[in-house]
Amino acid sequence: MSIQDRLKNLGIELPPVAAPAAAYVPFVRTGNLVFLSGHIARRDGKPWVGQLGLDMDTATGKLAARAIAIELMGTLQAAVGDLGRVRRIVKVMSLVNSTPTYTEQHLVTNGASELLAEVFGPEIGAHARSAFGVAQIPLGACVEIELIAEVQ
């Protein structure tokens, strides 16, 4: 099954690349690697604001991370023209806006990791990963994720 078929079966329509909110570009390609800038969680077109362990639970954070993965795939598609050219999701780095005592950043990040594996399959979608708890994210967003992919 193609990546486009998997997206369709999941009811996912990839968004266009969002305009950068500061002095950066949405992606950089060097050789066979594409580096995607951090994408913050959005809900209804606005930053998905919240802090895990204070006013947001892990399940909601996981949904936010999943939403970011959809945005990341939209940017990746814009970078390479066709997600079928992705040979490997190499690395995901997740920043989770959380209280000092919150310890489930890895579970929040599973929202993105699980969707990437579902869309790209276990060989291409499995990736190295880091998940960090941070004191704050731009615009008060609950999660920010960046991604590195290998392409053909």
Image (tube, helix red, strand yellow):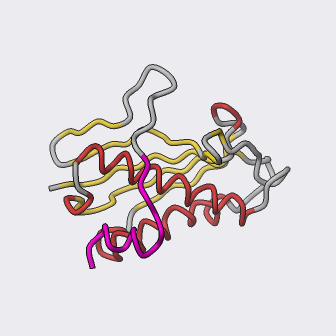
The N terminus sits in image quarter: bottom left
Q: Quadrant of residue 84?
A: bottom left
Q: Position of residue 30 (x, y in %)?
A: 20, 39
Nearest to the observer: residue 61 or residue 131: 61
Q: Position of residue 114 (x, y in %)?
A: 50, 70
Residue furthest top in the image: 23
Q: Residue at x 58, y 56 (%)?
A: 65
Give yes or no for residue 2 being in the magenta stretch: yes
Q: Is residue 27 left or right of residue 18?
A: left
Q: Is residue 66 above or below residue 93?
A: below
Residue furthest right in the image: 54
Q: Is residue 115 above or below residue 152?
A: below
Nearest to the observer: residue 19 or residue 58: 19
All told, the count of numbered labels is 0
Residue furthest bottom in the image: 1
Q: Residue at x 78, y 60 (%)?
A: 57
Nearest to the observer: residue 50 or residue 97: 50
Give yes or no for residue 10 being in the magenta stretch: yes
Q: Residue at x 17, y 48 (%)?
A: 32
Q: Is residue 63 left or right of residue 25?
A: right
Q: Position of residue 36 (x, y in %)?
A: 38, 42
Q: Which residues are magenta?
A: 1-15
Q: Is residue 30 left or right of residue 35?
A: left
The C terminus sits in image quarter: bottom left
Q: Is residue 91 left or right of residue 58?
A: left
Q: Residue at x 22, y 48 (%)?
A: 80
Q: Position of residue 109 (x, y in %)?
A: 58, 60
Q: Is residue 91 above or below residue 23?
A: below
Q: Is residue 140 above or below residue 119?
A: above
